[in-house]
Image: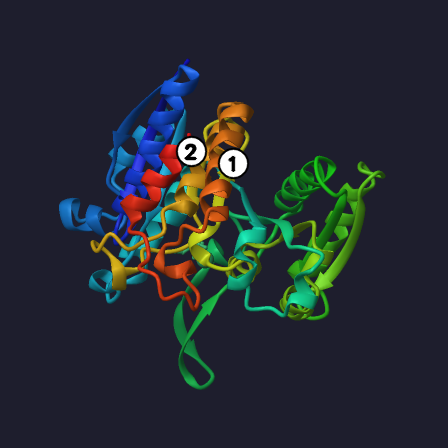
């Protein structure tokens, strides 16, 4: 089969890690007899520099016409002082919305070979960490009305959290469907003791839950969830939450698996065309130095094979290759821990994974 993939390398370490994932996909193509065509498009800071816009029209068109999108990362200090709607991050929200990608799946799993990298005590992690965060991606405070105005105490700024029944229903369904294929347990995270939008969220989740009597459902307040993730992470199977809570909690979930450099994500909508990206950012401090960990992006490519192309065997081949490389003790700087060994570069880590494929 032939698959057309739009490449959005973006800024900072984006180009390095995407190059690693492209090599891995090419290798998978050779082994399993598929052709992957890659077409690069600009997004984020590099797009601002080249065109004046963080999300050029051509990029949106190219992504819409592709079978799937692989994204590195956007942003950097150079563009940090631009007004909100001209920032590189705006492009990320723009492309998620333009492609209708309302679901963001963020699996967080602690590899046994990396247990020493986990900052939690061994007695806390002995039952393992293996959860999927289902983050709503095109609604909530990220997309609500915002602005500046004159307020009671002078100038003020506001952002609005708003969720419709339809938005909650569809993300809740994704969570229940995901749980059906895993541990059959959904924890919905909100702030229903304070926010009206969370009270609606909770009502709707329980309405949808009636369609899934085989899946256990419960609610957790977001502050408690932040605590439970470090106190008893094994209790989580599938977590469903809003855009902003999911953003925050997924960084926390990544750190307890050793490094944010390991966590992939899939952004999905109602079509097969998804966008796949590491959950980490552009890491300007190490950009261009060949130091980044490519694993999160390589695992994102595996998710692309699984969710957009239904290539389960191929996806597993990548995941197993990563597992073997980590088990063999190969480490990039972010997962080196207290070891005095020289860390692998981004390209060396990619090579190790290619060898296993
Ligand atoms: C993420 C990132 C983005 C987000 C930023 C870069 C806009 O933190 O994908 O988690 O907040 O969604
Ligand atoms: Mg984030």
Question: Along the line of sight, which residue is nearer the eye, 305 or 293?
Answer: 293
- Percent of width and height locating residue 270: 55, 30
Q: Is residue 185 left or right of residue 312?
A: right
Identify the residue shown where x is 80% and y is 38%: 212
- Percent of width and height locating residue 57: 27, 36
- Percent of width and height locating residue 303: 50, 35
Labels 2 & 1 near each other (Cβ < 8 A): yes
Secondary structure of residue under mark 2: helix
- Percent of width and height locating residue 350: 34, 41
Whether residue 132 can be seen here: yes
Q: Is residue 79 left or right of residue 173?
A: left
Q: Label 2: which residue? A: 356
Nearer the observer, disc 2 or disc 1?
2
Instruction: Locate the N terminus and report the quarter of the image it occupies.
Output: top left
- Please tell me in which quarter of the rendered image ligand 2 is found: bottom left
Q: Is mark 1 within 8 Å of ligand 1?
A: no
Q: Label 1: which residue? A: 320
Q: Is residue 76 left or right of residue 188?
A: left
Identify the residue shown where x is 36% and y is 32%: 24
């Amino acid at each position: 089969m032939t698959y057309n993939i739009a490449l959005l390398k973006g800024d900072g370490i984006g180009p390095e890690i995407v190059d690693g994932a492209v090599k891995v996909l090419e290798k998978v193509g050779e082994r399993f007899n598929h052709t992957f065509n890659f077409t690069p498009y600009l997004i984020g800071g590099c797009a601002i520099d080249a065109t004046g816009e963080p999300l050029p029209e051509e990029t949106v068109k190219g992504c819409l016409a592709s079978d799937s999108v692989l994204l590195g990362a956007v942003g950097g200090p150079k563009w940090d002082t631009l007004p909100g709607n001209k920032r590189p991050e705006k492009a990320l929200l723009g492309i998620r919305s333009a492609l209708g990608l309302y679901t963001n799946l963020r699996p967080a799993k602690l590899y046994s070979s990396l247990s020493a990298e986990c900052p939690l005590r061994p007695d806390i992690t002995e039952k393992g960490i293996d959860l999927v965060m289902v983050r709503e991606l095109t609604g909530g405070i990220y997309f609500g009305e915002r602005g500046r105005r004159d307020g009671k105490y002078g100038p003020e700024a506001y952002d609005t959290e708003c969720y419709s029944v339809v938005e909650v229903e569809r993300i809740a369904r994704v969570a229940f469907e995901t749980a059906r294929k895993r541990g059959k347990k959904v924890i919905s995270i909100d702030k229903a003791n304070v926010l009206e939008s969370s009270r609606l969220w909770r009502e709707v989740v329980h309405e949808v839950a009636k369609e899934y009597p085989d899946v256990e459902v419960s609610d957790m307040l977001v502050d408690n969830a932040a605590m439970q993730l470090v106190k008893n992470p094994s209790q989580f199977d599938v977590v469903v939450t809003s855009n902003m809570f999911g953003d925050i909690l997924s960084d926390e979930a990544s750190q307890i698996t050793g490094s944010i450099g390991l966590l992939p994500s899939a952004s999905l909508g109602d079509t097969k065309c998804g966008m796949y990206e590491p959950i980490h950012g552009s890491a300007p401090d190490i950009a261009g130095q060949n130091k980044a960990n490519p694993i999160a992006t390589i695992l994102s490519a595996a998710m692309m094979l699984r969710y957009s192309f239904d290539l389960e065997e191929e996806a597993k081949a990548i995941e197993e290759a990563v597992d073997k490389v980590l088990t063999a003790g190969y480490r990039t700087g972010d997962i080196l821990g207290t070891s005095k060994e020289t860390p692998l570069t981004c390209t060396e880590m990619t090579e190790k994974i290619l060898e296993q494929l």
